[in-house]
Amino acid sequence: MAKKQFKTESKRLLDLMINSVYTNKEIFLRELISNASDALDKLHFKLLTDNSAASSGNLEIRIVPDKENRTLSIIDNGIGMTQDELETNLGTIAKSGTLAFRSAMQKKTEGEEASEDENAPAANELEVIGQFGVGFYSAFMVADKITVLSRAYGSNEANIWESTGLDGYTVSPAEKADGCGTVITLHLKANGEEERFDRYLETYTLRELIKKYSDYIRYPIKMMVEETRMKEHECECECEHDHEDGECDCEHKEPEYETVTEEQTLNSMVPLWRRNKAELTDEDYNGFYTDKFHDYEEPLAHIHSCTEGGVTYNSILFIPASAPYNYFSKNYKRGLQLYSNGVMIMESCEDLLPEYFGFVKGLVDSSDISLNISREMLQQSRQLRAIASGLKKKIKAELEKMLEFDREKYEKFFKAFGLSLKYGIYESYGMEAENLKDLLLYKSAKEDKLVTLKEYAARLMENQTEIYYACGESEEMIKALPQYKYLIGKGYDVLLMTENVDEFMLRMLNGYDGKPFKSITDNDINIQDEDEKKALEQKQTEHAELLEAVKTALDGRVKEVRLSARLSDSPAALTSEGPLSLEMEKVLAEMPMGGGAKAERVLELNPDHPVFEALSRVKDDEAMLASYAGILYGQAQLLAGLKLDDPTKFAESLNALLVK
Ligand code: ADP
């Protein structure tokens, strides 16, 4: 039969597995068992939602070592795969973790020089295998031939997939009499000098590995186990000793031994969340997370809690280390797994998490939620609301703890998900502000690091009554603002805000700690320097006529032209008045439904700049004044990160000056 080729992207991974010198090859078993468990989950779920009469009570995984043939089989009676599914699932990289593995590998290798021996896996490849679950293909680390016999639920036909590695695979019809499910058979590699692959046929090894990696799998993992035991016998003597313990030395009968072969369940099946916290290590949690939620990075934190009271539930929540690529898109599916008494009833229950904590992964198991509850009923359920509100508090408390005790980790968290918190404040119209404001971080200009609002507020200058912030596309753009230089020069700290939502969100926060937020470009910024204010007012009156003339020359483009003492070494700057700032105008302009709302522009001029003098000199020459005003307005627009209204005219005015 013609062999089909693996998809190219899979080949590299496969090659890596086949030639792996990774010492921890044993993880293949964990990967296959976890796939089997997923297949059982899927069938269980299907039976539940189909309202099928078929029982899902006998779902199980069996491990069958065959020493004679040097094969190890992993068998499940789960959902199975159709012919098409065998092809697509096993011919291509499927696993999200595996895909991530591949891109991580690519990133790693791009930055590095090619190794001398092209075939040798680089050390970092090995390091990465350990961190990632690499799914089905990991079996090629220990086997040189793999067959997958599968029959899909609801089908009478079975198929067998077979591959000896890189040269491709075949899929052909086969017989499978005992119902749906999958039998994966690994033909173990020959023992090498250092590696004994036949150890994966030993009861002892298999038992150890299952305990180590798959203990909490909630389906029984069964295996035929040979055991030698003392034979039970009836002793006729009347002494009260326990003969089985060999305690009796009266000479009645020698103990006899027998070897029995019986099927044993090797995993305890107690789900992790039902186990005692004190017995669990970070490794247990992290392994559970990466395995169950298909992430290749360990989470930043886990929250395991058993809550009793109004509603009783167990929960394990995880805070991932990075945002999934689609986190900020509509495609991202937020939600927690919901279990009723250990049985999964919903894969992703949205109502358990507020949208702004949508990055949290995990599960909730409650005996107070009925197994057969419908989605509609669930949404109405008082229990569910109580759980959701409990979880929200726990997540917040965990983040606060991280912020206080592990700042570095928190900053990593905030980089990944801070935007989500900001949207939480904005989209709730400030209802969640109290809840979230202390979790925000902003770059402090003065300290050149991220600070909380509380930290900023605690370090105000004497007499400072406002919290200063500046918005812009980048820190560089902000630092080029004339007003920025002025404030920093005076010793004030400024929070740098570079995300679109920032200023909109601030509008929803009613100040912090009684101090209003003030953009550094705001005209009425309250810097307590009475002398300066007075001097400025005086100049303003003095030059009233000129300012009016500039405004007229700008022909309705600005609401006002006024003097400012906050422009440091720039002759002009643009600010706004009213509820909409220039930054907000820019953000709205980018949005499809933005509607093109405009900020009310105010042109500020620096009376101490030589350019102002030059402007005064042309006061009576209408054409010149218009040209100067246009140039000043244009450069103020550019500094504010705005586009010129009329670039041609701007260039012409400049050129006219150059040839003068
Ligand atoms: P992942 O399990 O993360 O998706 P794998 O490469 O391990 O990645 O498996 C690829 C796909 O093959 C799985 O998503 C699943 O659809 C299918 N599969 C693997 N093992 C089984 C099994 N025992 N029963 C049914 N489907 C399976």
Image (cartoon, rainbow, N blue to C red):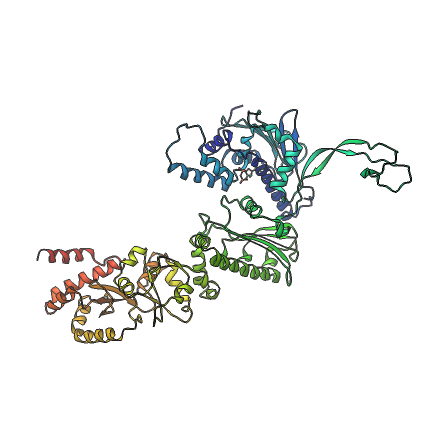
Query: Which quarter of the rendering shows the C terminus?
Result: bottom left
| Picture coordinates of residue 435, whole percent (x, y) | 49, 64
Frontmost residue, 359 versus 475: 475
From the viewer's side, name the closer residue of 55 and 53: 55
In the rendered image, the vertical position of residue 296 relative to residue 654, given as above or below = above
Report which quarter residue 107 is drawn in. Answer: top left
Quadrant in the picture for residue 637: bottom left
Q: Position of residue 28 (x, y in %)?
A: 56, 35
Q: Position of residue 338 (x, y in %)?
A: 60, 53
Q: Where is residue 649, by image quadrant?
A: bottom left
- Residue 231 visible (yes or no): yes
Work out whether residue 190 or residue 58 is closer to the camera in this orientation and state it.
Answer: 190
Please give left or right for residue 349 compared with residue 109 in the image.
right
Q: Quadrant of the N terminus?
A: top right
252 or 580, nearer to the observer: 252
Q: 517 above or below 217?
A: below
Q: Name the quadrant where ligand 1 sits.
A: top right
With respect to residue 75, does 459 lie above or below? below
Q: Give coordinates of residue 92: x percent, y percent.
A: 49, 35
Q: Is residue 161 left or right of residue 468?
A: right
Q: Residue at x 55, y 25 (%)?
A: 193
